[in-house]
Amino acid sequence: MTASNHPHDESTTLDSTAHLMNRISSQLADQLSLVSLNGTRRPVPPAPPALVLVAHGSRDPRALSTVRALMERVRELRPGLPVHLGHIELNEPRLPDTLTRLGTAEAVLVPLLLARGYHVKQDIPEMAAEAEARTRVAAPLGPHPLLVETLYDRLVEAGWRTRMNDQTRRASAVVLAAAGSRDPDSKLDTNRTAHLLADRLGVPVVPAYASAATPTVSEAVRTLAARGHHRVAVASCFTAPGRFATQCAEQAPWLASAPLGAHPAMARLVLHRYDQALATAEVTAPELASA
């Protein structure tokens, strides 16, 4: 028998054999992990409760793509966790349809909302109560330091300078633009987020609203200008692009940040609210979780 003229053939065969042996070893290890030391089969651990992201919904097509991108980030951070999406209105899938598909499974609903209000206290719990799925509703995403981390990064991306001299700092301020609600708890939460952001930036931060509450963004800008702040940025406290986010950004006299979107800190915050909900008793109208 003559020697092979292609030495790499032998190497390729060895590589293939090694790959096959590794696969067999991995599969065997997976099987053995299900067997206890006394030879009995270990019970398969139950699947974790599903995480259902609850988005408001928007006619802006960018909103749905943004929420889906955030959902993928959550899945990447927690492989093996079932993650679903449901909307309160305007977009598919609607939350009741998502819950129907879950059957009688256990699920945690995480609102992609940034403060308490009617949707968190009424709409979502009512939809959950009508479903067969065993659900609990997590707290909204704000206020929380991870939300502030995202707001800060979005401002920096828009051109906010992280280093300022004293004169520039005295002239600078931020309007925190939020959706707004008639619920006083919503305003408390937004005020808390503004306070945390002011601590992070070292400049005044005034909350303002797109609807249902005052001041408006333009009113907040005028108030800050009257106080000598002529470099006023608008921080977009919206989960995704939409009508309100666009209207608020258009009123910025200087720069406006992008909505929060699929920022890595937002994905971590979603999972934090999920874990918090699992660690507490099931509730139908979540109170503000501590940051």
Image: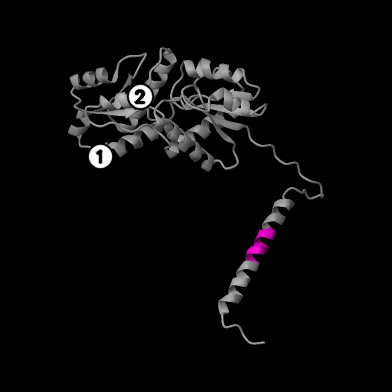
The answer to whether residue 280 is visible is no
Q: Which residue is mark 1?
A: 163
Is residue 23 on the magenta stretch? yes
Q: Is residue 193 magenta?
A: no
Residue 120, x across and y down, in percent:
50, 19
Given the image, on which type of amino acid does mark 2 rest? Arg
Specify the amino acid type for callout 1: Arg
- Vertical placement of 130 versus 91: above or below? above
Q: Residue at x 31, y 34 (%)?
A: 155
Q: Which residues are magenta?
A: 18-25
Relative image position of residue 153 (x, y in whole percent):
35, 37
Determine whether the residue tagged by mark 1 lies in a helix, strand or loop.
loop
Residue at image point 35% right, 14% down: 213
Prevalent SS, magenta region: helix
Residues marked 2 and 1 touching at CB (< 8 Å): no
Which of label 2 and label 1 is nearer to you?
2
Q: Which residue, given by chain and number where applicable, does mark 2 sit on?
A: 243
Image position of 261 with respect to 123: above or below = below
Q: Position of residue 151 (x, y in %)?
A: 36, 32
Badge 2: how crowded within 10 Å, few (<14), some, or many (20+)? few
- Identify the residue shown where x is 25% and y is 32%: 255
Q: Residue 36, labelled with which disc? A: none
Residue 109 is drawn in which quadrant?
Answer: top right
Q: Is residue 83 left or right of residue 242?
A: right
Q: Is residue 89 left or right of residue 101?
A: left
Q: Is residue 46 above or below residue 6?
A: above
